[in-house]
Image (cartoon, rainbow, N blue to C red):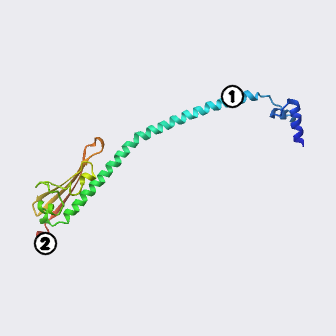
Amino acid sequence: MIQNNCNTSARAVYGRYSKHAEQQIYGIISMPIEQESYTVRIQRSRRGSSLIDVMLSLFLLSIVGVIFSATFPPAISCSKQARYYKTANALAEQKMEEIRGIDYESLTRPLLVGRGIIDSSSSESAFFFTQVDNVADKLPQGAGVLQITEIPGDLKRITITVSWEGVGPTGRRSITLRSLVADKRTRAAG
């Protein structure tokens, strides 16, 4: 009931209820503030700060966008290049295991073509396995070369090279594996 009396007396003095009128009734000394103009100033300053906030947010977002766009294409290029290296290495290792599974005396062009290990278009010095293993389908402009070199002492050096066209300005890339194959017939007899 006391609250209603205060509100009623404040309305009687000022014609409407306000916080300023209530403070005067309770005996609090205060300075009157122009409430309408103060409210307008707050709203104007809030509008300005929100515009600055939006501009700052857009600026930071554009900086993040520029950094992301600068690092994203090289990351994709590196990913592709790593995938090509992995594929080329797998092809070379697979071909090396095929060669190791063959007898020493069978490492000749006619027998390798007959077993489907090298292409029929291979020459006597360099054997290709590009078509047999579909290297061109797995790597961009991919090619596979197998070289067998006689070494004194009943050994043959096997060199397998898988090459492809690199991503971007890197040019031609290749992986080379080398191994020695011994004639087991002479080793067992000796």
Mark 2, residues whose alpha carbon is within 10 Å: few (<14), some, or many (≥20)?
A: few
Which quadrant holds residue 101? bottom left
Quadrant of res 160: bottom left
Q: Quadrant of the N terminus?
A: top right
Q: Position of residue 33 (x, y in %)?
A: 77, 28
Question: 32 and 190: which one is in front?
Answer: 32
Q: Which residue is painted at 51% across and 36% down in the image?
A: 60
Dots 2, 1 in contact, CB < 8 A: no
Horizontal side of 176 relative to 121 (left or right) equals: right
In front: mark 2 or mark 1?
Answer: 1
| Picture quadrant where residue 11 is located | top right
Dot label at residue 64? none
**Residue located at (51% from left, 34% from top):** 59
Q: Is residue 47 left or right of residue 91?
A: right
**Callout 2: helix, strand or loop?**
helix
Q: Which residue, given by chain and number where applicable, does mark 1 sit on?
A: 41
Report the front residue among 112 and 46.
112
Give the CA separation, mark 2 to mark 1: 102 Å
> Disc 2 or 1, which lies upstream in sequence?
1
Circle 1 crowding by C-alpha within 10 Å: few under 14, some 14–19, many from 20: few
Position in image of residue 26 (x %, y %) = 86, 36
Q: Secondary structure at mark 1?
A: helix
Q: Position of residue 178 (x, y in %)?
A: 20, 57
Residue 169 locus on image (x, y percent): 28, 40
- Depicted 157 relative to depicted 187: above or below: above
Q: Give the amino acid type for the residue marked by disc 2 in the picture.
A: Ala
The answer to whether 79 appears left or right of 91 in the picture is right
- Front-most of residues 72 and 180: 72
Residue at image mark 2: 188
